[in-house]
Amino acid sequence: MLEKANLFIVTAPSGTGKTTLLKRLVAETPDLAFSVSHTTRSPRQGEVHGEDYYFSTPESFKEERDRGAFLEWAEVHGNYYATSRQAVDSQLEAGCDSILDIDVAGAAQVRQKRADAISIFIVPPSIETLRKRLVGRNKDSLEVIERRLANARRELEQLFDFLSAIVNDDLERCYAELKGIVWSQRMKTANRSRYLQGLISS
């Protein structure tokens, strides 16, 4: 358990590799966990309430939003998504670092409420590289891909609002940098001798 837990925000344009990086980071890092988001969309096959998302109706979502229950929220393609203030605080109070996988707009909302949050922006080497990655995934139509690229250009304009930026031109190197930022922050806030001993013995 950390002696002082940290709140990390990680964002990136769609197709940059953020999800792959974060899943590995959480799997390999003790006392680091995702905050489970709230959403009004229907559960997909295999998704579990309370593990993948907290699923709610639009009415109950709006009630929670209006009473200030969310650190950030957004409407995406007709559905609402949000990060619970209580869920994040519970993780931090339990001594577990919390990591938020959210978009640029959500990150701005969180930074306004939590000035101590460590914000990280993962960026592609270029828009052309991002286009090739999105086309290569073969998940979206060309129209959707162009819309994602337009969104990426707008998001990248906010790059300097983040404390750190990592270019994902090589997945392993990018992961090493991301992991380094997390552990560097921990050295500032946690019991250094205990964590260093853990690193040496691992």
Image (cartoon, rainbow, N blue to C red):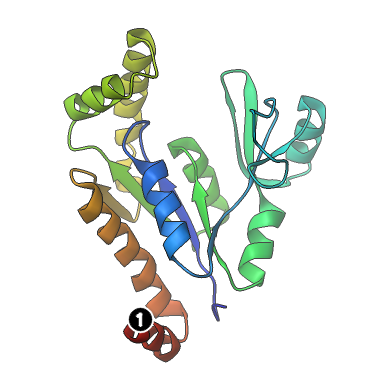
> Could you tell me the amino acid type at mark 1?
Leu
- Which one is in front, 126 or 28? 28
- Please give the name of the residue rendered at 52% of the width and 40% of the height, measured from the top-left corner: 106
Where the N terminus falls, by quadrant? bottom right
Residue 33 horizontal side relative to residue 14, left or right: right
Q: Is residue 157 visible?
A: no
Outermost residue to the front: 46
- Please give the name of the residue rendered at 32% of the width and 85% of the height, measured from the top-left corner: 200
Residue 114 horizontal side relative to residue 127, left or right: right
Name the residue carrying label 1. 199
Which secondary structure, mark 1? helix
- Please give the name of the residue rendered at 38% of the width and 44% of the height, measured from the top-left corner: 20
Q: Position of residue 88 (x, y in %)?
A: 63, 57
- Which one is in front, 198 or 96? 198
Q: Position of residue 104 (x, y in %)?
A: 43, 38
Q: How many marks?
A: 1
Q: Is residue 187 visible?
A: yes
Name the quadrant containing residue 202. bottom left
Q: Position of residue 116 (x, y in %)?
A: 49, 63
Residue 23 horizontal side relative to residue 96, left or right: left
Name the quadrant containing residue 177. bottom left
| 78 over 170 or under it: above or below | above
Q: Position of residue 37 (x, y in %)?
A: 63, 43
Dot 1, how many residues are within 10 Å of its Cα: few (below 14), some (14-19), or many (20+)? few
| 110 over 44 or under it: above or below | below
- Which one is in front, 8 or 66? 8
- Please give the name of the residue rendered at 70% of the width and 28% of the height, measured from the top-left corner: 40
